[in-house]
Image (tube, rainbow, N blue to C red):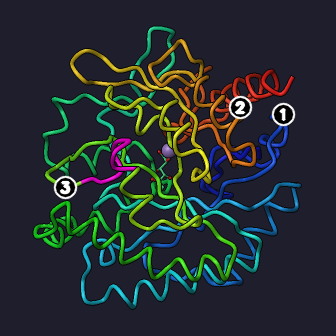
Amino acid sequence: MKMGFRWYGSGNDSVSLDQIRQIPGVDEIVWALHSKLPGEVWEKDEIKAAVDEIKAKGFGVSVVESLNVHDDIKTGAPTRDMYIDKYIESMRNLKEFGVKVICYNFMPVFDWTRTDLFHPLPDGSTALFYEKSRIKQDPKEMAEYILKECKGLTMPGWEPERMAELDSLFEKYSKIDKETLWENLKYFLEKLMPVCHECGIKMAIHPDDPPWDIFGLPRLITSEENVERFLSMVDDPCNCLTLCTGSLGASEHNNIPAIAERFADRVAFAHIRNVKIYENGDFSEVSHRDCDGDVGVLGVIKALHDKNPEVYIRPDHGRHIWGEKCRPGYGLYDRALGIMYILGAWDMLEK
Ligand code: CS2
Ligand code: MN
């Protein structure tokens, strides 16, 4: 297993590489060029600058999260081939710097969605929270809220440039139903697979978060059944999953350890975090500890350990603890605790 830590880059993250070096067992920085909009090519000199900075501190750069997919690819617009060509150009550039896994998502318009980014927990910390009844509100209000809370830091999937054109983005998706979205995903991946083999890169889709339709937009990677459909639709060892336990785990219908076990050989990358689901369907993010939430974190770790010991793992969102001021979900302290929990379980399984 290779342990990673997501880092948003100098000037764009409250956490430094020097701090990350002091967390035991971190091999890799999970990185991206966060100034790039979906559809822009990642040029070699830009990649080199980012990679050199990370490697200088002794970390690997094998996992990119995310190389984001342009909405014209998702909607199958006439310009999609042009955007797929750009995507492939970025992949070929990334290959030259040793990238092995590309995490991406196929969620329409938005990335992950929460109604409260700093919800108080009983222990005095705060965490990301989703209140079902509040999500019916206008997506524009949602975007304003999220951008305000991020205080100028980049927020993948919620780029101000894209949020300014929300009406036209929603218009693009107005004729896209679920089946069309599946077809567009298949089209995209079939173009990419030969490039993956040429470059030795695995594409690892991130599940939809939350794993159900929101704002009337269709979502695909939401359940065991749909993961199975996704993997068999393009049945290629380079077509893989980012097993985000908290995304799929926000639905009480998903048994995450069972999903981890069943698809272990196609999990190229795992995001480990825990969520607590309330009776009304609201959910809160909680600590990584198994008994604090409903994901079954230990079962997931065991499945990956037993069936895919080479996997890349990172802790996903943490709570905001000890007064830390940070990007929502991406502070230093609770994610470092998460790493120690995962490594503790892993080391014990090894023994
Ligand atoms: C991440 C996702 O913060 C998160 O929840 O796991 O935003 C993830 O980076 C993207 O969906 C991948 O494209
Ligand atoms: Mn995730």
Q: Nearer the viewer, residue 306 or 213?
A: 306
Q: Which residue is mark 1?
A: 24
Quick one: SS at disc 1?
A: loop
Label 1, residues with CA under 10 Å away: few <14, some 14-19, many ≥20? few
Q: How many marks?
A: 3
On residue 155, the disc is none
Question: Marks 1 and 2: CB-CB under 8 Å?
Answer: yes
**Kind of residue indicated by mark 2:** Ile
Which residue position holds label 3?
Answer: 217
Residue 22 against residue 168 in the figure, above or below: above
- Residue type, numbered disc 1: Pro
Q: Earlier in the sequence, mark 3 or mark 2?
A: 3
User: Do the numbered discs 3 and 2 sit on residues whose CB atoms are within 8 Å?
Assistant: no
Magenta stretch bounds: 219-227
What's the amino acid at mark 3? Answer: Leu
Which class describes the residues within 10 Å of circle 3: few (<14), some (14-19), or many (20+)?
Answer: some
Q: Is mark 2 within 8 Å of ligand 2?
A: no
Q: Which numbered marker is on residue 339?
A: 2
Seen at 80% across and 21% down, the residue is: 348
**SS class of the residue under badge 2?**
helix
In this rendering, the label closer to the viewer, 3 or 1? 3
In the displayed structure, 58 sits above or below 69; it is above
